[in-house]
Image (tube, grey):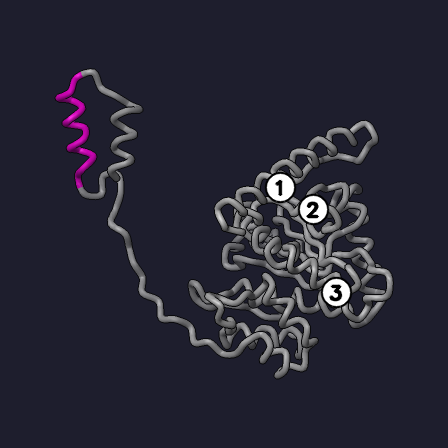
Amino acid sequence: RSIYLKYIDTGLPIKYKKLEEERKQLLLEPDAICKNPIIELVPRYEEYCTMGEACTKLNLVESFAHFAKLGLFPDRNKVESKMYEHQFKSLSTAIKERKHIVVTTGTGSGKTECFLFPLIYDIYKEKILNSSTENKSAIRGLILYPLNALAEDQMRRLRRSLSSEMVIEHLDKYVDGKRISFGRYTGITPFSGKEKESSRSKLNKEKDSLVRDWKSAKAQAETKKNIDYLYDIPNMDEGVNAEYWDRWTMQKTPPDILITNYSMLNIMLMRKYEQNIFDKTREWLESNPGNIFHLVIDELHSYRGTSGTEVAYLIRPVSY
């Protein structure tokens, strides 16, 4: 409140000090410009088992536990992280029973892990099994968000999980250098329209800008001793190629995980530019009965009424 009052005094000054003082007194009244914080005490969720224990119990690929430690599910304060029971049940239900899941747990319960664990595990296992063969480009997981801000938050999570230096080293060792690719396809993703040679320079300028930003982020991370700076932009190091940051690349070679919103998905389904994305995904699904397509709808409760019906009709063509 003090900072905001200073902003008002300096940004919107009044010539007469008496009037300025009267305004200040009015703004100091309870609930005038801010309220007291509302604090909710939430019990800590009971920890169930480590990722390694989960892999043993469910008979999953053992190296996935090590892979998860590198970013997807890292240790905390040098203590091995343990998943909650509902996270373990989500992994078991989706991977072993091949059933759909709806997660309705409370605040801070790790709902994101409930869909990321099964999604990334399936992709990881496919890369392991097909390490010596060609990797078919297709969407293995489509994650829908109602807001771009939520999609951006997920991008930071995926960068930590799939494109950090340690993760890339692991993939080089265990899956013959194959990447688990991902990309955000929204209105801010460059560039709209059909790819043309005349537009190539525009893409190169965007890439040069990202490379500069990436070098700056690495310098900041080194100076501040904080790796979080590395997750705000794509990893542009040579040979990483995990995040697809432009539309044209994703149109030609769909990423394993595509993050978008329902408005953009609606446009993509109607436009020829993006048709190849869905064609390749269909081909991948038909190539092997064991291939699984994950559709993740985050913030499901927000799709209600007329808008909820519209989104339902939009999703059905993707599902079929």
Image quadrant where residue 27 sits: top left
Please indicate whether residue 30 sits to the left or right of residue 260 in the image: left
Nearest the viewer among 164 and 136 is: 164
Secondary structure found at label 3:
helix
- Residue 179 in which image quadrant: bottom right
Q: Is residue 95 above or below residue 155?
A: below
Residue 21 position within the rendered picture, expressed as x and y whole percent measured from the top left: 15, 26
Q: Earlier in the sequence, mark 1 or mark 3?
A: 3
Give me the residue at 50% from left, 55% from top: 302
> Within the magenta stretch, is there residue 18?
yes
First-in-chain label (2 vs 1): 1
Name which residue lies at 29% across and 58% down: 39
- Foreground of the two, 253 or 68: 68
Circle 2 crowding by C-alpha within 10 Å: few under 14, some 14–19, many from 20: few
SS at circle 1? helix
Would you name the residue on which mark 3 appears?
A: 173
Q: Which element type, helix, strand or loop, lies under badge 2?
A: loop
Amino acid type of the residue tagged 1 in the rendering: Trp
At 54% from the left and 76% from the top, the residue drawn is 50
3D distance between C-alphas at marks 2 and 1: 8 Å
- What's the distance in space between the residues labelled 1 and 3, CA to CA? 25 Å
Residue lying at the far left of the rendered structure: 18
Q: Which residue is mark 2?
A: 237
The mark that comes first in sequence, 3 or 2, is 3
Report if residue 217 lies within the magenta region.
Answer: no
Q: Position of residue 100 (x, y in %)?
A: 63, 71
Cβ–Cβ under 8 Å for marks 2 and 1: yes
Read off the magenta span. Answer: 16-29
Q: What is the spatial separation of the Cα atoms under label 3 and label 2, in whole angstroms?
A: 18 Å
Q: Position of residue 167 (x, y in %)?
A: 66, 60
| Residue located beneath label 1 in the image | 214
